[in-house]
Image (spheres, grey):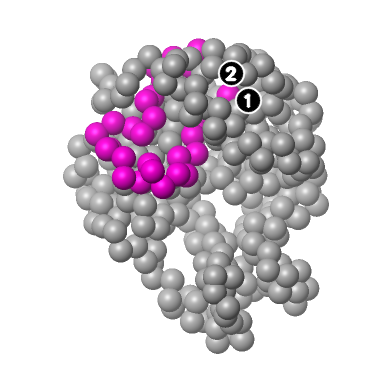
Amino acid sequence: MKEQKKITYTCVTYNRGKMLFNLLYSFALSNRYENYEWIIFEHDTTDGTANFLKKLESGNVPELDVMKNKVKVIYEDQDEYISSIEKLGYTFENPPVGFRKKHLCYQGKLRNQMRAIAQGDYFIDLPDDHQFLYDGNWAQDIIDIFDDRIEKTGRDDIGALTFRTRALYRILKKNNETYPVEATQSGIEYYVVKEKTWDDWSAISRENFERLGGYLQLETATEEEVKKYWNDEKMFHYHSMLDKTSALGLKKIMTKIPIMHDCGDNKHVKANMSFPVFPIARDKEILNKMWSQIGKDRCMSRAELEAMWPKHSSNKGAGPREA
């Protein structure tokens, strides 16, 4: 049997303890791929998230027993880092813009910190308010797309492989315009985006991440980088990575059928977490049937998935599966 490549899932969490549990619970219920690890970065939370993560690390969350010894947590207060940035002469004034810049300047640093200790051949960065959707070997589907790109182009040309539902405007934006659908030998359909080369919540190989030199950090940025990404009110870590992936000729890939759902609505924060917010589909064919009713040659949007899911789901809530 071919040895499984290792996947490192990374997640930064802030005051979304219930949604973080939902993310991990949906993973535990749906994952069929064994060679993985999770690294979670907790900073400044006040909602009990840190206590939950300490229980998870010690193996005291029964619903997540299958993840025992698979999770590492970094606990950090961002004040010390922000203070060091301010000593360099950077200021965070005029809220809410100042608050946003203060938060975003931290993102590259903490992501680099997680990936410095990661053991995976692939890194998958996930937000804490998302959920996995179907029960199956979707992790192998992701790796198959990487292998398919190497076979078709002669190299790993993926800067970002994203597999979540998208708000409709993100699909229709010009820089998300795609080439015609492609497919792996196993039948996983995906699109190559024509212009955009990066997405925060995505998969990338360790090799390409290292070629990119990691995320830009404000304290080590050049004057030119500061002028381009900081003084212009841009998302510092995001836009710099967008430019770097573009310069290397890397691509953004979007799966046609979503593997994850963007539960980024506040109504989900108070949801009953006895079951995943959205049921785990026992058969990926459910998602294919839903997609076929849309009939458009693009990725599924969040609104479409939420509207269609109750009509086609085979279960109202997925409890712990049988071994």
Q: Which mark is residue 256?
A: 1
| Residue 42 drawn in magenta | no
Q: Is residue 39 above or below residue 148?
A: below
Magenta stretch, residue numbers: 257-285
Q: Is residue 159 left or right of residue 153?
A: left
N-term-proximal mark, 2 vs 1: 1
Would you name the residue on which mark 2 appears?
A: 291
> Disc 2 vs disc 1: which is toward the camera?
2
Name the spot of residue 70 as percent of width and height, x first: 34, 42
- Which kind of residue does numbered mark 1 sit on? Lys
Marks 2 and 1 sit apart, C-alpha to C-alpha, by 9 Å
**Residue 186 in view of the camera:** no
Name the spot of residue 299 as percent of width and height, x first: 64, 28
* Classed neighbour count for the residue bearing mark 1: other residues with Cα under 10 Å, few (<14), some (14–19), many (≥20): many
Label 1 SS = loop
Q: Is residue 206 left or right of residue 286?
A: right
The residue lying at 52 percent from left, 46 percent from top is 125
Q: Are marks 2 and 1 in contact (CB under 8 Å)?
A: yes
- 293 or 254: nearer the eye? 293
**Magenta stretch prevailing secondary structure:** loop
Q: Is residue 111 above or below residue 321?
A: below
Name the spot of residue 235 as percent of width and height, x first: 64, 62
Name the spot of residue 261 as percent of width and height, x first: 49, 34
- 83 or 292: nearer the eye? 292
Label 2 SS = helix
